[in-house]
Image (cartoon, grey):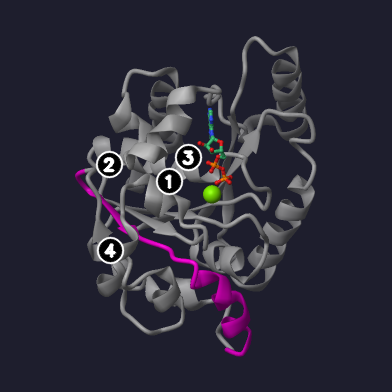
């Protein structure tokens, strides 16, 4: 099973929107997808229409060893897309896990049996570089970094890259950067174009060709509890996420991409 962490310690850059819609796009192309909501805010869970009453077992119980993976999984309205939801309890995990010797490997260990059931797993990370994001980087094969096409886009990125480097050196030598995805791009705004050019000049080929436009349908969809790709599959945002999924598949190791 391919494991991808969707991470950026900045809030509001499009992590959750990317995780939900990429997961949906991958499921639509036939992959069996598991999305793990690792943000105490639970936006991915809400955005996929999983009510709080359906979150008895969540990523919190999973990380703290109070339930097994199968118990925490809930189906979504999207065929082939399953979710491990998040609740506010997860905000306590940061402190609770500190005590545990294997605190950085809790997610990794809980996914050992997942390979038989899903082809790919996406982890929606919280806006911090704390123990939750570290767990997802330890468990992942690669990282997808959403970057908002705004002034200061690159600020803080070096901190994330340093964290990835540290995880690679200490715990997970195979961790790679799958790509950087520019989000909320506004073609009419010269700053957006300028930022996109700067980001490409600075980071090079790691930046996906596909750019996610600023699109109101993407921000409306979560309030209806469905991914934008279901809410309006023809809007520019949905089309961009389908294109990003194709580009992502092309970047995956060959045997996996053929699966
Ligand atoms: P993060 O998970 O990084 O905090 P979100 O995906 O929740 O970011 O996005 C932050 C806000 O911006 C949300 O209200 C979301 O609906 C909105 N948003 C995200 N991507 C886009 C986009 N491409 N166009 C318009 N709104 C977007
Ligand atoms: Mg989020």
Q: CA distance from mark 3 to mark 2?
A: 15 Å
Quadrant where the C terminus sits is top left
**Label for residue 54?**
4
| Crowd tier of the residue under label 1, counting other residues whose Cα lies within 10 Å: few below 14, some 14–19, many 20 or above | few
For the residue with label 3, is its CB less than 8 Å from the closest atom of ligand 1? yes
Q: Residue at x 22, y 40 (%)?
A: 30
Q: Residue at x 41, y 84 (%)?
A: 65
Label located before the other in sequence (1 or 2)? 2
Mark carried by residue 253: 1
User: Distance between the Cα atoms at labels 1 and 2?
Assistant: 18 Å
- Label 3 vs 4, first from the N-terminus: 3
Specify which label sits upstream in the sequence, 4 or 1.
4
Report if the CB atoms under discs 1 and 3 are less than 8 Å apart: no
Badge 2 or badge 4: first in the primary sequence = 2
Establish whether ligand 1 lies closer than 8 Å to the Cβ of label 2. Answer: no
Between 139 and 52, the residue placed more toward the observer is: 52
């Amino acid at each position: 099973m391919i494991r991808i962490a969707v991470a950026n310690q900045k809030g509001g850059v499009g992590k959750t929107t990317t995780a939900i819609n990429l997961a949906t796009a991958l499921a639509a192309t036939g992959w069996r997808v598991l999305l793990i909501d690792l943000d105490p805010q639970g936006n991915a869970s809400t955005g996929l229409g999983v009510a709080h009453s359906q979150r008895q077992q969540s990523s919190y119980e999973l990380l703290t060893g109070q339930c097994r993976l199968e118990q925490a999984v809930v189906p979504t309205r999207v065929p082939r897309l399953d979710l491990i939801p998040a609740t506010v309890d997860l905000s306590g995990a940061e402190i609770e896990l500190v005590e545990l010797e294997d605190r950085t490997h809790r997610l990794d260990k809980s996914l050992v049996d997942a390979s038989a059931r899903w082809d790919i797993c996406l982890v929606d990370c919280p806006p911090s570089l704390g123990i939750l994001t570290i767990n997802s980087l330890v468990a992942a094969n690669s990282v997808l970094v959403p970057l908002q096409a705004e002034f200061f886009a690159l600020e803080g990125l070096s901190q994330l890259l340093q964290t990835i480097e540290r995880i690679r050196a200490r715990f997970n030598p195979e961790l790679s950067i799958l790509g950087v995805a520019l989000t909320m791009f506004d073609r009419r705004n010269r700053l957006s174009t300028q930022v996109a050019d700067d980001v490409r000049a600075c980071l090079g080929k790691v930046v996906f060709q596909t750019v996610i436009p600023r699109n109101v349908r993407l921000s409306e969809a979560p309030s209806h509890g469905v991914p934008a790709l279901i809410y309006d599959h023809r809007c520019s945002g949905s089309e961009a996420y389908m294109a990003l999924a194709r580009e992502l598949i092309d970047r995956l190791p060959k045997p996996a991409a053929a699966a």
